[in-house]
């Protein structure tokens, strides 16, 4: 179990590094926030699962669908421009006890 949690932590760390690199690349898909949210909802049925504040005062959010298992990480600048940082499948919500060293 501890090995599984450790591997997941490494995966999330790699994802965070990928997200930082993607935010600095010109090829990232970006659009006004309202348009991106509408597509996430209409096309994939994704809703916001978590939110945090990232570098440059960007709002970083994870959207996912419990029905399809798809997920999207979105970064939104203070100007309202949202950029898709990463997408994937097999999303699983976790409920871990407080203080769990995941």
Image (cartoon, helix red, strand yellow):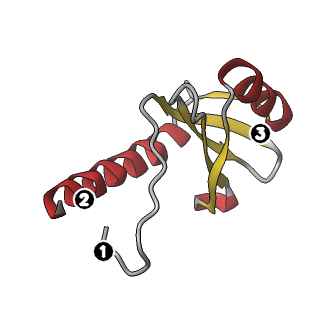
Q: Residues within 10 Å of mark 3 (few under 14, many from 20)?
A: some
Is any atom of residue 90 visible in this view?
A: yes
Viewer-side label of 3, 2: 2
Q: Which mark is residue 5?
A: 2
CA gap between label 3 and label 1 equals 34 Å
Q: Quadrant of residue 29?
A: top right
Residue at 34% across / 75% down in the picture? 100
Q: Name, please, the residue furthest toward the bottom.
A: 99
Residue at the (46%, 61%) spot, across then down: 95
Q: CA distance from mark 3 to mark 2?
A: 34 Å
- Going from N to C along the chain, the mark reached first, 1 or 2, is 2
Q: Are marks 1 and 2 in contact (CB under 8 Å)?
A: yes
Callout 2: SS: helix
Query: Residue 81's x, y, as percent?
Result: 77, 39
Q: Residue at x 28, y 52 (%)?
A: 8
Residue that numbered label 1 is attached to: 101
Mark 1 closeness class: few <14, some 14–19, many ≥20 residues within 10 Å: few
Q: Could you tell me which quadrant the N terminus lies in?
A: bottom left
Ranked by sequence position, the earlier of labels 3 and 1 is 3
Q: Position of residue 9 (x, y in %)?
A: 29, 58
Residue named by callout 3: 81
Q: Is residue 32 left or right of residue 21?
A: right
Neighbor class of circle 2 (other Cα within 10 Å; few <14, some 14-19, many 20+) is few
Pick the front one: 10 or 58: 10
Answer with left or right where residue 7 lies relative to residue 76: left
């Amino acid at each position: 179990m501890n090995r599984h949690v450790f591997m997941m932590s490494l995966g999330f760390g790699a994802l965070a590094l990928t997200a930082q690199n993607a935010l600095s690349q010109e090829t990232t898909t970006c659009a006004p926030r309202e348009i991106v949210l509408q597509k996430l909802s209409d096309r994939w049925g994704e809703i916001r699962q978590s939110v945090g504040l990232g570098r440059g005062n960007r709002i970083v959010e994870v959207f996912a669908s419990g029905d399809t298992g798809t997920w999207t990480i979105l970064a939104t600048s203070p100007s309202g421009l949202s950029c898709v940082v990463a997408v994937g499948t097999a999303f699983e919500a976790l409920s871990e006890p407080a203080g769990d060293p995941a």
